[in-house]
Structures are given as C-alpha cells and as structure tokens.
Image (cartoon, helix red, strand yellow):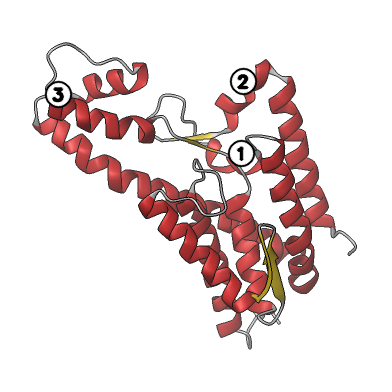
Amino acid sequence: MRITDTVKHLLIINVIMFVGTMAIGNGELFYKWFALYFPKNELFQPWQVITHMFMHGGFAHILFNMFALWMFGTAVEQQLGSKKFLFIYISAGLGAVLFQLGYYYFNYLPLHADLIGSGLTSDQIIQMLSSNKAISGISQAQFNDLQQLFPIYNASMVGASGCIMGILAAFGMMNPEAKLMLIFLPIPIKAKYFIPGIIILDIISALTGQSFFSPSNTAYMAHVGGALTGFFIMWYWRKTQFNKNRWN
C-alpha cells in the first residue's frame, strides 16, 4: 500500500519527537515539556494538549501506533483526502484529551472537596500531592483521600492512540465489512463488530482497572474519546452527504 502524504508527514513528526525524547535531557526534558500533565500539576502547559499526540513512551509504543497509522490512516486519507483526514486525526486527539481529563476530574473533584471540607487548604493539598509527603497532623481519612488523588495529580499522557482510534472509527464506518485482527487474537472480525468491541473493552478497563490487550498504564478513556470523536464526525458527514460536507 502506497503511503499517503499526510500520513508520511505525521510519521516523520512522531519519529523526530521520539528521537528528541531519547536523545535530549536523558529522556526527561522533552517529556516534561511536551507530555500532557493533569492541569492542576505545575508541569502542565497549554501546548501539551497538542504536543502529547506526537510523543511516545517507548519503542514498542511508537512502533505499534505508527504501524496502525500507516495501515488505517493511509486507507482513510485515500478515501477522504488529506484535509478531512487531518481534521479527524487532530479532532480525535482533542476528543481523547477531553474524555481522559474529564474522567480524571470526575474522580479528582469530589475527593478534593472532601479534603477541603476536612480543614485542609488547596495549597496544603497541592504541596502533599507534588512532594508525596504528608504534613503532620492529618487524619487517616485525609491520608486515604490523598492516596487516591496522587496518581491523578501526577498523571501524564503521551501517544497518538487517541488520534488513531478516531481514524480507526472512520475506517470502520467507511469499510464496515473489512475484516480486522488483533495481534494477540488472530481471528478475522468485521470492522463493524471489531471497533465497537475495542471501545467496550477500553471502557471496561477504565472502570475496573482490568487490562485486556494494553499495558496497565494506558489512558483508556482517551481511546474511547478518540474513537467516539471520529465516529461522530463521520456520522455528521454521512448525514449531510448531499451538501458541502459530503464524505463519500
């Protein structure tokens, strides 16, 4: 399959960012600059909303994502054209951010409110979460809440997975009868069943912590957000196929 121009440029950008991460600052400097941190964290910067989409946490991570980008992205760009393909790609990445951060805040805010209600100040909470050291005099209940907040406050997100899930959803809507397979489950499944199945597994993983095919530190709700964003964009274009937004 001949690689398309936009996919080729995205591959190049991702590889450059990966090499930069590995070569500059012992793998930490690029990560702190360009990974997406929880907005309450002092390391958060607005540009990370975009830059994290081109960052990866290891060789296997970038290899798998770039293979998926080449395989599905090329087909989608050939069918939609470069502008619509890139629109879905970036929009899916933003949808992934919205879902993952929304999920974090859904868990963070009630615990934070409990701690404020118990007498701690916001500054004290941030101090303990950033240093991983409890101040003297806190209760066991406060300590338990802080333990639950710690992984959210210190969470970071990298990878093109949200973007690629949006492209995968677009591919499935345009090619519902295409047969796909997981590397770990080499059974051909039609795209119209395969893609919803992957989304359901990601939701289950996010809610239960049970990982099926991804590492345990995967941002599962980002996958869901990317896929749903790609789906709704394609649904809108298909619904309005008789006007200027026609996609087929």
Location of the C terminus by quadrant is: bottom right
Taking depth in this image into account, of 89 and 160 the one nearest to the observer is: 160
Cα distance, mark 3 to mark 2? 33 Å
Q: Which residue is mark 3?
A: 120
Q: What crowding class fits label 2: few (fewer than 14 Cα within 10 Å), some (14-19), or many (20 or more)? A: some
Residue 215 shown left or right of residue 17 in the figure: left
Q: Position of residue 181 (x, y in %)?
A: 69, 67
Residue 190 occupies which quadrant of the picture? bottom right
Check contact, mark 3 vs mark 2: CB within 8 A.
no
Q: What residue is at 44 percent from the left and 54 percent from the top?
A: 205
- Residue 188 is marked as none
Q: Which amino acid lies under the numbered mark 1 shown in the image of this protein?
A: Thr
Q: Which amino acid lies under the numbered mark 2 shown in the image of this protein?
A: Leu
- Residue 51 is marked as 1
Taking depth in this image into account, of 22 and 203 the one nearest to the observer is: 203
Q: Which residue is mark 2?
A: 29
Cα distance, mark 1 to mark 3? 34 Å
Residue 3 shown left or right of residue 122 in the figure: right
Q: Which amino acid lies under the numbered mark 3 shown in the image of this protein?
A: Leu
Residue 121 shown left or right of residue 235 in the figure: left
Q: Secondary structure at mark 1?
A: helix
Location of the N terminus by quadrant is: bottom right
Q: Nearer the N terminus, badge 1 or badge 2?
A: 2
Residue 24 shown left or right of residue 78 in the figure: left
Q: Nearer the N terminus, badge 3 or badge 2?
A: 2
Cα distance, mark 1 to mark 2? 14 Å
The residue positioned farthest toward the right in the image shown: 2
